Structure formats: structure tokens, C-alpha cells
Amino acid sequence: MERPSYLMRVEMVEVTAATGTVSCSTTSITVLPVADDDSCQITVNGNKRGTVTALNVGATLVRLEVKSSDGSNSQVDVRLC
């Protein structure tokens, strides 16, 4: 039986990069990025926030992209080992 996904909360406040560690047996996580402005649109690896993200053996790069209501974009890369 596969272990449930881990939940990772990332607050998008002046963050440009982050790292995290999960156990070797973890096969997926659910990333729920949060922005100060509720009108921001956030994606995780190009998918809707809260989508299960599969993990590779070794390091996995998770890209969070934020589009603000004024049309500006920013991104944060989270490296999971």
C-alpha cells in the first residue's frame, strides 16, 4: 500500500528559492502555496495548486509560479532531496 502524500505549505512572501527534505519512501507530495493577495494565481509545475506532485529518486525541482492581479509574474523553485 502506497503511503499518503505529504502536505507542503509554502508562503509566497519574498521567497526566491527553498529546499526541503522528505524520507526516501515518499513518492509524492501535495504543495499548497499561499500568497498574501488572494487574487494571485499560483501554479505548481504548471498545474493547479494542490495537485499531487510525483517525486523523483534523488532531487526533485518543484516550480511555483505566481501571477498577480496586475499581470506581473514571479517564480520560486523548491528543491526537494
Image (tube, rainbow, N blue to C red):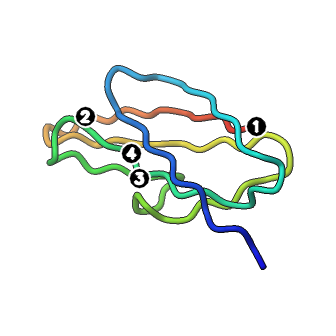
Query: Is 55 positioned to the left or the right of 64 in the image?
Result: right
Between discs 3 and 2, the one toward the N terminus: 3
Distance Cα–Cα, label 1 vs label 3: 21 Å
Mark 3 surroundings: few (<14), some (14-19) or many (≥20) residues within 10 A: many
| Secondary element at tag 3 | strand
Which residue has dot 1 on it?
Answer: 81
| Secondary element at tag 1 | loop
Which residue has dot 3 on it?
Answer: 43
Between discs 4 and 1, the one toward the N terminus: 4
Q: Position of residue 72 (x, y in %)?
A: 25, 34
Closer mark to the observer between disc 1 and disc 3? 1
Which residue has dot 2 on it?
Answer: 72
Which residue has dot 4 on it?
Answer: 33
Q: Amino acid at mark 2?
A: Ser
Mark 1 surroundings: few (<14), some (14-19) or many (≥20) residues within 10 A: some
Q: Amino acid at mark 4?
A: Pro
Q: Residue at x 46, y 42 (%)?
A: 64
In the depicted structure, whether residue 61 falls above or below residue 30: above
Q: Nearer the viewer, residue 73 or 22?
A: 22
Distance Cα–Cα, label 2 vs label 4: 17 Å
Between discs 2 and 4, the one toward the N terminus: 4
For the residues bearing labels 1 and 2, Cβ distance under 8 angstroms: no
Between discs 3 and 4, the one toward the N terminus: 4
Query: Is 62 positioned to the left or the right of 2 in the image?
Result: left
> Image quarter for residue 22?
top right
Closer mark to the observer between disc 3 and disc 4? 4
